[in-house]
Amino acid sequence: MLLVATVVGATAVPAPARAQDAGTAGATDAPPPAPARLELTGLAPVVGALVDVDEVAWTATVGNLTDADGSDGATWSRVDVTAELRAPVATRSALRAALGGADVTPLLRRRSVALEPRALEPGGSGRAAGAVPLQGLAPAGEPGGVHPLRLRVIADGTEVARLDTAVVRLGTAPAETLATALVWPLTHAPLLATGDAEADAAARAALAAAIAQDGRLGTA
């Protein structure tokens, strides 16, 4: 199973570009400022049956930055934050792609919550808290995986910001015991009776010392 530290990447959705004035047509304009700020303020990075956490709970803050360019800005009458949990990734490269915003695995669950306060004026900020349940996402005994998680801010029906991160889900431990065998790395020749009483006694003593609790092959 691929285990990683939780990494958070925030991506602001650019505001619509303004039409150029006739006198500046063809000039290179600076990128428009982002219309919103999205910050993840709380997330349990490890979830699942093995740690007795059956949901991906999160908290976030959202800011209205539509007045950052010096304009009057826009008041949003309804702001929702949507959490999207995807199937686990299989490789580190897939995880990097997911954290970069790519949809590399199928969507498993989507949950939306309203921002508090629901309306957001220019320069204002609000808080949202939600959870994505894990029940039914994996069969019993499944070991777990690393799930991409995306938060999206929807203001009056338009996405204005998003954030990509990941959580580690630990499944249940194996129900059956695993039979194992211990192999000692013996490096000496086999002990053979040579007929020499003194040599045989020395060989047996050397082997006994090697496998003693504090010996070379001891298991302490």
Image: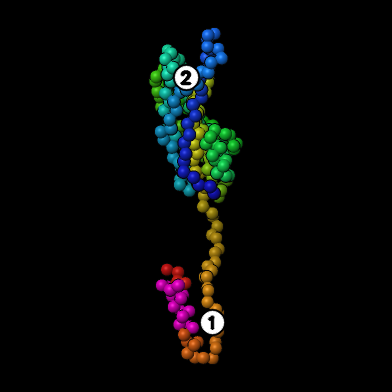
Q: Position of residue 12 (x, y in %)?
A: 49, 26
The label on residue 181 is none
Q: Position of residue 202 (x, y in %)?
A: 46, 85
| Quarter of image, res 195 | bottom right
Earlier in the chain: of badge 2 and badge 1, it is 2
Is 124 on the left-hand or right-hand side of 94? Answer: left
Residue beneath label 1, please? Answer: 191
At 51% from the left and 18% from the top, the residue drawn is: 29
Image quadrant for the C terminus? bottom left
- Nearest to viewer (mark 2 / mark 1): 1
Q: Secondary structure at mark 1?
A: loop
**Amino acid on which disc 1 is placed:** Leu
- In the image, 148 versus 81, the foreground residue is 148
Q: Which residues are magenta?
A: 203-216
Residue beneath label 2, please? Answer: 78
At 42% from the left and 18% from the top, the residue drawn is: 68
Give the residue furthest to the top: 22
Classify 10 Å Cα crowding around label 1: few (below 14), some (14-19), many (20 and above).
few
